[in-house]
Image: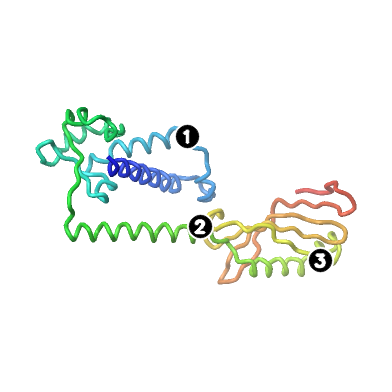
Amino acid sequence: MLLRLVAFALDGMFAVVLVFVARLAFSPAGTTPWESARAPLDTRVFLAVALLLVLRDVVFFASPAKWLLCLRLEQPDGQRLPFTQRWWRAPWSILPWSLAPQRWQRRQRWRVRTYVPSRIGLALRTVCTASAAIASVGWALVTLRPSISSPAAETLVASLVRDDVQLRRTLGEPVVADIRSIARRGEVWMPGTASFQLRLQGTQARQQMRVLARRVEGEWAIEELSEIEIHSMRDSAQVAER
């Protein structure tokens, strides 16, 4: 019973991952992976996950999770379950039959039983499990890392303040830069780009903005400044926004 419950949970995770990947693949142009992941769930997502769960045992004799846990569908006499019976069983497979009383399970035309895999099968399971673990760690490292390093962001800000005379005149020298937050790699919309919040403060005013940078031939360059707000240092009232 425990193995069957774990297999059902794993198949559910696999279905969610497949739907998530499909959602990223068919997301509108310009949408970041982070925005796609955080987009509100709709009925189509739940239906897609449910459909994958229902059909998980139809194509093969066991779902991916059952295969990993050495479980398979059989007839009561030990023979493999034919395709027609697997198809007939599909609508009912989403129910937790492992929690049903034994007398109900004995009335079914199928059984979920364990088996001992061959050496090749055991090696394949080990490779698949290790690959999934490595892929998960790699995905976390790539998407959760900052899109730009702090020294590179500081260099960009220093060049921005040095080259923009009008900015220094508006804020009043000396201008102090404060990099508030750097977006993760999963939050930017394409590789080679970075984004971070910046606050510049001078003797007359302070300015907040979002900086979008792009790596060109190995060097970072500012591509766009957006969400710009300028506040006077004389009072708390906002004096300009664009």
Earlier-in-chain disc, 3 versus 2: 2
Characterize the local packing of mark 3: few (<14), some (14-19) or many (20 or more) Cα atoms within 10 angstroms: few
Please state if 99 lies on the left or on the right of 173 as rendered: left
Residue name at image x 12 percent, y 36 percent? 76
User: What SS does tag 2 mark?
Assistant: helix
Earlier-in-chain disc, 3 versus 1: 1
Mark-to-mark CA distance, 3 and 2 = 36 Å
Residue at the disc numbered 2: 143
Residue at the disc numbered 1: 42
Which residue, as the protein is rendered here, is positioned at the far bottom? Answer: 218
User: What SS does tag 1 mark?
Assistant: loop
Residue 139 percent across, percent down from the top left: 45, 58
Residue 39 percent across, percent down from the top left: 52, 41
Q: Depth-wise, is mark 3 or mark 2 nearer the camera?
A: 2
Above or below, 159 against 25 in this view is below
Q: Which mark is residue 210?
A: none
Q: Please identify the quarter of the rendering in which residue 170 is found.
A: bottom right
**Which amino acid does the dot numbered 2 rest on?**
Thr
Earlier-in-chain disc, 2 versus 1: 1
**Which amino acid does the dot numbered 1 rest on?**
Asp
Mark-to-mark CA distance, 2 and 1 = 24 Å
Please state if 87 lies on the left or on the right of 19 as rendered: left
Residue at the disc numbered 3: 165
Please state which of residues 41 and 165 is positioned toward the viewer in this rendering. 41
User: What SS does tag 3 mark?
Assistant: helix
Residue 5 percent across, percent down from the top left: 31, 40
**Which amino acid does the dot numbered 3 rest on?**
Val
Which residue, as the protein is rendered here, is positioned at the far right? Answer: 234
